[in-house]
Image (cartoon, grey):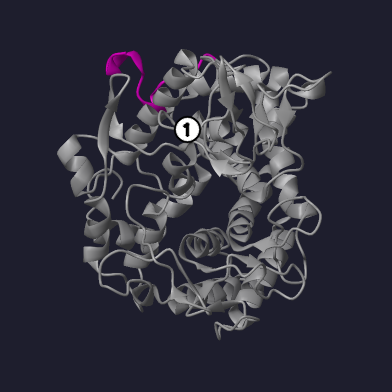
Amino acid sequence: MALSAAPQGLAARAAPQASDDALLDGLQRAAFDYFLQNANPRNGLVADTTRDGAPASIAVAGFALSAYPVGVEHGWMARDDAVVRTLAALRFFMDSDQSGGTGATGFRGFYFHFLDMRSGTRMWGSEVSLIDTAFLIAGVLTAAVYFNAATPAEIELRRLADALYRRVDWRWAQPDGRAVVHGWKPECGFLNYGWEGYSEAILMYVLGLGSTTHPLTESAFRAWTVTYQWENLYGFDFLDAGPLFIHQFSHAWIDFRGIQDAFMREKGCDYFENSRRATYVQREYATRNPRSFAGYGPDCWGLSAGDGPSAEPRLVAGRRQAFYGYAARGVPYGPDDGTLCGSSMVSSLVFAPEIALPALRSMAARSPGGAAECIRASGFNATVSEAGTSGWISEGTFGLDQGMIVLMIENYRSGLLWRLGRSNPIIRDGLRGAGFRGGWL
């Protein structure tokens, strides 16, 4: 497949069908409602999933803070209500226990990955998570830019957001002066691996480099990019990462169109174009369907991180196929057990609407009752088809999936989150610190 066969980015709008707006409206509004229905209004924490007993996820809280401006813009919630919810979260995190103990909320401005929905203390023995804190801080900064009125509440909101960001000790998380660690636990200290190899952590590096109090060193970003793997797959030259979410998460907040770091300048590419190519690679893999899974095709693709069946192994195309439950699936090297992630197709709208919209129509048609459950669910597997069903669908919904649906549909339609990011001096300074130049910078 030649590169010229795939049109460039947002200029390549798919020919819309009359039902597309209704489909996107329904998906975005239902996903937004997740943050209203699964939040604790007293502390702003939001559940990781709708499953019983789920803890709060700090990353999902960050998506909620980013989604509230979208809700205000669409008239789904009043601005005052959004400010109240945002302030509840910011006050909680500002006043939370930062001692790093087993019953604390965080350490050195970072936070434990999972928290008790009521008390806000550490759950499940989770780590102080660098990347999930980055998603939280991205939401904090989004709120600070959007809520810019001179009212006492919005002034307090911006003050708290600034204090929360300034408190994060990014340099502490770079103990060897190079790669940033994945996390820290009070029981054992830093985890034994760092953020190396292309991933969603580009957002984390930008935020860390933009700090005026505890910044990462510029060597951190260089140490990261030297671990990149540039590949050619199905005729596409691109920076490879198997799961589709890696090519999407940082793009929810940062507009990478036309700006390049040193690595991308050398390749004559940018991260937005790279994600567009990764989207086409996903579609080509599903079209070729080398492992002969049910449902895969040019209008049904999207391997990413998400829930999957824990079914007993069964024969698929003459081989014994296992199923992996929750996993980060990717192409072309796997893992792959026939499970697709609908939210990854939604998030592809900004990069390649000409192939993402037909895929969403196809997935919506598969959903029971036409309600697009397959898209909003954390995973769908047509190969695991029990009696009377057309395939396995993950139970409940996951906050990260809903957040990406809200934010990426909005960026596709209005670019709201990108505009807020471009106007944020922290994002601009962080990008420049990472060596980005050109375009809107």
Give percent across and percent down for residue 366: 71, 19
Give percent across and percent down for residue 173: 38, 72
Q: Nearer the viewer, residue 98 or 317?
A: 317
Whether residue 42 is in magenta: the answer is: no
Which region is colored magenta?
Answer: 1-15
Looking at the image, is 415 positioned above or below residue 89? Answer: above
* Drawn side of residue 208 relative to residue 288, left or right: left
Q: Residue furthest left?
A: 266
Q: Nearer the viewer, residue 287 or 387?
A: 387
Residue 189 in sight in this render: yes
Whether residue 5 is in magenta: the answer is: yes
Q: Quadrant of residue 305?
A: top right
Give percent across and percent down for residue 413: 54, 33
Give percent across and percent down for residue 368: 80, 23
Task: Residue at 76%, 40% (x, y): give it.
Answer: 395
Type of amino acid under label 1? Val
SS of the residue under disc 1: helix
* Drawn side of residue 440 relative to residue 157, left or right: left
Looking at the image, is 412 positioned above or below residue 235? Answer: below
Task: Residue at 64%, 17% (x, y): give it.
Answer: 362
Looking at the image, is 149 positioned above or below residue 411? Answer: below
Residue named by callout 1: 350
* Drawn side of residue 92 relative to residue 352, left or right: right
Task: Residue at 77%, 50% (x, y): give it.
Answer: 50
Q: Nearer the viewer, residue 353 or 173?
A: 173
Looking at the image, is 215 positioned above or below residue 294? Answer: below
Q: Quadrant of residue 211?
A: bottom left
